[in-house]
């Protein structure tokens, strides 16, 4: 089954422009249909497998100096970015006619 660039980006948790860049660089195979690229799900799975295998830490880096498992900082950052909501600023009058920005 084939999926679009935006669907692939949603599955990967990445920006669609990142997926398009991977296609241009040859990291991800895609077929052009009209003006759009479509990606085979097997090719997307192969990319995920290749990036997961390449991200393994050397054995001496897998434990902290006190013997505990090394925290997965990249996963923690990705989780925090997924949970992040942008703050919308609004203008609030402050007496002299000047407004200051605060979050609602």
Image: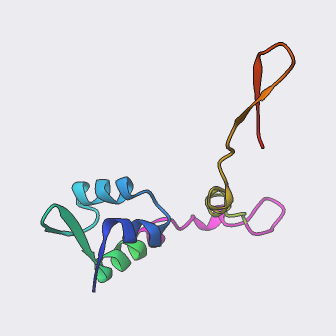
Q: 51 or 65, which lies in front?
A: 51
Q: Position of residue 85 (x, y in %)?
A: 67, 54
Quadrant (top left, top right, bottom left, bottom right) of the C terminus? top right
Q: Which residue is drawn at the image coordinates 61% and 60% (left, top)?
A: 78
**Is the image coloured rainbow, by chain, by secondary structure, or in one colour?**
rainbow
Give the quarter of the image for residue 48: bottom left
Magenta stretch prevailing secondary structure: loop
Q: 64 or 19, which lies in front?
A: 19
What span is in magenta? 51-69
Taking the image as shown, residue 80 lies to the left or right of residue 94, namely: left
Magenta run includes residue 49: no
Q: Is residue 95 above or below residue 36?
A: above
Q: Position of residue 17 (x, y in %)?
A: 36, 53
Q: Which residue is drawn at the image coordinates 76% and 22% (left, top)?
A: 99
Q: Is residue 45 above or below residue 19?
A: below
Taking the image as shown, residue 33 lies to the left or right of residue 98, namely: left
Q: Which residue is drawn at the image coordinates 71% and 36% (left, top)?
A: 90
Q: 56 or 104, which lies in front?
A: 104
Q: Which residue is drawn at the image coordinates 12% and 65% (left, top)?
A: 34
Magenta run includes residue 67: yes
Taking the image as shown, residue 11 lies to the left or right of residue 28, namely: right
Give the quarter of the image for residue 61: bottom right
Give the quarter of the image for residue 96: top right
Q: Which residue in the rendered view is the most extreme toward the top?
A: 96
Q: Position of residue 57 (x, y in %)?
A: 57, 64
Q: Which residue in the rendered view is the most extreme toward the right?
A: 95
Q: Is residue 10 above or below residue 42?
A: above
Taking the image as shown, residue 87 lies to the left or right of residue 30, namely: right
Q: Position of residue 95 (x, y in %)?
A: 87, 18
Q: Which residue in the rendered view is the most extreme toward the bottom?
A: 1
């Amino acid at each position: 089954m084939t999926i679009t660039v935006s669907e692939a980006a949603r599955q990967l948790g990445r920006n669609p422009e990142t997926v398009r860049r991977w296609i241009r660089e040859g990291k991800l195979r895609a077929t052009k249909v009209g003006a759009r690229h479509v990606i085979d799900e097997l090719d997307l799975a192969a990319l995920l497998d290749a990036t997961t295998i390449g991200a393994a830490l050397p054995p001496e880096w897998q434990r902290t100096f006190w013997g505990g498992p090394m925290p997965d900082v990249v996963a923690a950052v990705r989780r925090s970015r997924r949970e992040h909501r942008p703050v919308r600023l609004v203008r609030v009058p402050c007496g002299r006619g000047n407004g200051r920005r605060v979050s609602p």
